Amino acid sequence: MTLQRRILILVCAAVLLAAVGVLAVVRASSRADEKNHPRAGGPQIRRGAVSLAPAEGGRRIVFRNMAWGPHRDELATVAADAPDGPRTASGVSCLRFHSAAGTGICLQADKGGVQEGYRAVVLDAGLKETAVHPLAGIPTRARVSPGGHLAAWTVFVGGDSYAGTNFSTRTSLLDLRTGRLEASLEDFTIHKDGKAYRSADVNFWGVTFAADERTFYATLATGGRTHLVRGDLAERTVTTLRENLECPSLSPDGTRLVFKKRVQGLPDDAPWRLYALDLASLQETPLAEERSVDDQVVWTDDRNVVYSLPGDFGADLYTVPADGSGAPARLMTSALAPAFLG
């Protein structure tokens, strides 16, 4: 093969690669622009006032709207007894969200700097910012205590999935009564198997709060295993209770936790099933949802929980009884991170 022919082949290959790259950028741009336009058959959405205060006219759901259109990613609300009804969008965008007792925590992208970062924003009942804290990584979990006095959030600071093992998280707790920020639960004293424990590989995620506004539960990962821990904010301690529990969520009456559990034999990228743990008897009960749920559930009341699964347009919300009975049912399409208020 002559030198001229080799050069021609290289030039053609370079042109082809450039064309493929341009096509990929154009398609990605087109896809992104498509998400800015409402899809046929999607939920009706209008701009309006959204409040985190207990609803006088009945219970409401405030959530991250995932439906395509100009209000995608905004906090929106619907009546809890009509989740498929028209949505009211707030104009406030969040990647992760939770609310209780008139307080909200919104983890959002911070596009004000040279490079995009993330921040945790505390919201009052009218969605006004009352405090802002920079985040060290990608938002993944958020919770507000039942009384609205505490907030917690988890970010990925390395890796991007709980399904694997090569990731690192940072979980922070904020006391809104004093403004004190515990930047990382890794600074708390860990009691494991009755002894003080320290290790460089410790990670925490998935905080859920008790009604006393002091006690919390969370996931601790170390040594290739996950543990349920009970934390004491005043003492700055966590104590391991049980293995193989992730992203616990405490029931409103404080008697049970629903969590995701790794089940042997399931695929590495979809390893979880939902279980309930009775805190008095420590008996576990599998829930009726047989799909792998990578979420921290939200309790709608003392009987049912809600969680997200991938949908055609981002994520859909499903509900299932927390006692192992019944069957899962889709609650809302194109929605994420719900909070049930009122």
Image (cartoon, grey):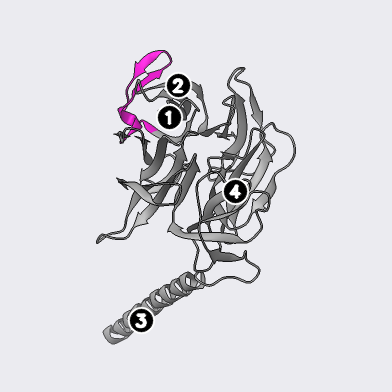
- Checking the image for residue 60, the label placed there is 4
Q: CA distance from mark 1 to mark 4?
A: 33 Å
User: Which residue lies under the disc numbered 1?
Assistant: 220
Question: Which residue is rendered at x = 30% and y = 28% of the image?
Answer: 187
Q: Nearer the viewer, mark 4 or mark 2?
A: 4
Q: Nearer the viewer, mark 3 or mark 1?
A: 1
User: Which residue lies under the disc numbered 3?
Assistant: 15
Residues marked 2 and 1 touching at CB (< 8 Å): yes
Residues marked 1 and 4 touching at CB (< 8 Å): no
Residue situated furthest top in the rendering: 194
Q: Which residues are magenta?
A: 183-203
Determine which quarter of the picture holds residue 301. top right
Residue 199: in magenta span: yes
Disc 2 residue type (three-letter): Thr
Which of the two residues, 283 or 261, is positioned nearer the viewer here? 283
Q: CA distance from mark 4 to mark 3?
A: 55 Å
Residue 166 appears in the figure: no
Q: Position of residue 308 (x, y in %)?
A: 58, 48
Q: Position of residue 87 (x, y in %)?
A: 59, 60
Label 4, secondary structure: give it. Answer: strand
Disc 4 residue type (three-letter): Arg
Q: Position of residue 226 (x, y in %)?
A: 47, 30
